Structures are given as C-alpha cells and as structure tokens.
Image (spheres, rainbow, N blue to C red):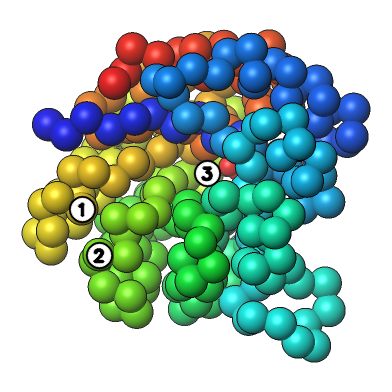
C-alpha cells in the first residue's frame, strides 16, 4: 500500500479571533513535525496573521471567477497572495446554505489549481441519502463532477475530505468502520481510472472528530487524517488530535 502522509486540518468556519490565532498558532508550532501536515482554515480575514506565525493556512472557499463585480467574493489569486496554500471547495455548508452545485464546486477546484492552491474537495451524503442507500452514488457524483471537467490527473494535486453531512457539528461521528467503508469505496472507484492517483490521494475524514475518537478513525487503512471543525478551536484538543495522527504513516 502507498505511504500517505497524514493531514490534520482545522476548519474554523465563521469563528475565531485575533487572540485565537496566536493561541492556536503557538500550539500548532509546538507539535509541528515531519510526520503530519497541519493546516488551518481560519476566516479569510485572519489568514495573513496566521501565516505570519508560520502555520500552513488555507481559505474555506474561493470564488469560481478571476476578478470583477462579485461583491464579497475572494479570488484564488488574492487568497494565494494572503498566504494561503490550500482551499476547501464544496464544504457541505457551502453546498447547503449557499447553494453551490457540483458544477460550481468543480469550477472552484479548477480555479484553485490554476492559481497554485491545493484544493481540498469535500464530499458527503445527508442522513436521508444514507438511509435510502444513496451514499456511494452521491459521493461518486460529487467527485465525478471534478473528474469530468478536469480529468483524473487533476486529483493528484489535491486532497479529498469525506464528511457525512449528518456527522458535521452534531456530535454523531461515523464509526471507524462506516468511514473506512466509504473511503475504500472512493479509493476503489478512483483506482479503476488511475491506480497511482488513487493510491497517492490523501482522503481525510470529517464530522465530529475529537480528541477521543480521532485515533480509532485515523488508524483505518484508507483514512489519512481529518478535517476538524469544533475541536480545532480548542488548542489542547487540536494538538492531541494532531498527535493521534502520528504513527499512522
Ligand atoms: P465538526 O465540523 O468537526 O464540527 O463536525 C467538521 C467540518 O465541518 O469540517
């Protein structure tokens, strides 16, 4: 099996403050090491400040357009100038609350790569979809929207995050077995198109990950780390989640 470096990513959503930037940055810098990549996705207004602490940062979304009359949007080019190296695309809150379609997400994915940002493509099913047996279909459609626009090779410079919508912010984590089953489905599906791309792709799990459950999730063979929401706002919990990704290389 390919050796994939684990990633622990913190998604602050619309939370945090200048004070929290310095608190979390100090904690992240203390646990920085060569065996796990730690990335923080703070609100865009805090990007530069956090990058100045030497923490790897990304944006929570980017515009699918280059520039122009799109009030409130942030371009990939500007995100890069602000210090971002990654960007989330297609987070379920963007899809559900802001109506982002699979096509818009694919456009954002493309725009990120054109501007030298690594996209973290977020996919996942709702509770209703899981209950009606549509998990694999939904996840496949979300990923295929990117592949049909850009080709399978585009995934080799990206990260994937499987985040079941019913597990986000609910305290209802997928079991390690449930998460592993979907991660394996994704990797198998991609390997029919390119075995090297499928084996090298880091696939993160997200949805109510905390310092108690991270280890059992991260030790699953196809789970390469996590995308952490609520627990990434607490320095102690986030550091212990980062540490729990060690040894999983
Ligand atoms: P959560 O959020 O860890 O608070 O469930 C995860 C996410 O939305 O990325």
For mark 1, give the secondary structure. helix
Name the residue nearer the viewer: 15 or 139.
15
For mark 2, give the secondary structure. helix
| For discs 2 and 3, the disc positioned in front in the rendered view | 2
Mark 1–mark 2 contact, CB under 8 Å?
yes
For mark 3, give the secondary structure. helix
Task: From this view, report whether residue 145 is shown above or below residue 155.
Answer: below
Judge left or right: residue 228 versus residue 147.
right
Tell me where residue 218 sits by quadrant: top left
Q: Residue at label 1?
A: 197
Distance from disc 2 to disc 3, alpha carbons, whole Å, reads 30 Å
Task: From this view, report whether residue 162 is shown above or below residue 77.
Answer: above
Judge left or right: residue 245 versus residue 28.
left
Residue 94 percent location from the top left of the image: 63, 62
Distance from disc 1 to disc 2, alpha carbons, whole Å, reads 7 Å
Q: Earlier in the sequence, mark 3 or mark 1?
A: 3
Name the residue nearer the viewer: 36 or 131.
36
Which quarter of the rendered picture does the C terminus lie within?
Answer: top left
Name the residue nearer the viewer: 66 or 244.
66
Q: Earlier in the sequence, mark 2 or mark 3?
A: 2
Residue shown at the point (64%, 42%) measured from the top left = 57
Residue 61 percent location from the top left of the image: 64, 60
Q: Which mark is residue 210?
A: none
Residue 28 percent location from the top left of the image: 64, 21
Q: Residue at label 2?
A: 153
Distance from disc 3 to disc 1, alpha carbons, whole Å, reads 28 Å
User: How many labels sit on residues?
Assistant: 3
Q: Residue at label 3?
A: 166
């Amino acid at each position: 099996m390919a050796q994939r470096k684990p990633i622990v990513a913190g998604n602050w959503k619309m939370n945090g403050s200048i004070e929290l930037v310095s608190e979390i940055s100090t904690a992240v810098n203390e646990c920085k090491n060569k065996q796990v990549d730690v990335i923080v996705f703070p609100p865009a207004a805090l990007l530069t400040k956090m990058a100045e602490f030497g923490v790897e940062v990304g944006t929570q979304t980017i515009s699918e357009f280059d520039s122009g009359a799109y009030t409130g949007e942030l371009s990939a080019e500007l995100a890069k100038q602000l210090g971002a190296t990654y960007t989330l695309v297609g987070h379920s809150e963007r899809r559900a609350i802001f109506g982002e379609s699979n096509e818009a997400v694919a456009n954002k994915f493309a725009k990120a790569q054109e501007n030298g940002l690594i996209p973290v493509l977020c996919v996942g099913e709702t509770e209703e979809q899981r209950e009606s047996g549509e998990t694999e279909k939904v996840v496949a459609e979300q990923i295929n929207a990117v592949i049909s626009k850009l080709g399978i090779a585009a995934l080799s410079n990206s990260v994937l995050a499987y985040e079941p919508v019913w597990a986000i912010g609910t305290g209802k984590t997928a079991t390690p077995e449930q998460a592993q089953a979907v991660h394996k489905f994704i990797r198998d599906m991609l390997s029919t198109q390119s075995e090297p791309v499928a084996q090298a792709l880091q696939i993160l799990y997200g949805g109510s990950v905390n310092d108690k459950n991270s280890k059992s999730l991260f030790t699953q063979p196809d789970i390469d780390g996590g995308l952490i929401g609520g627990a990434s706002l607490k320095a102690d919990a986030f550091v212990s989640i980062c540490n729990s990704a060690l040894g999983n290389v």
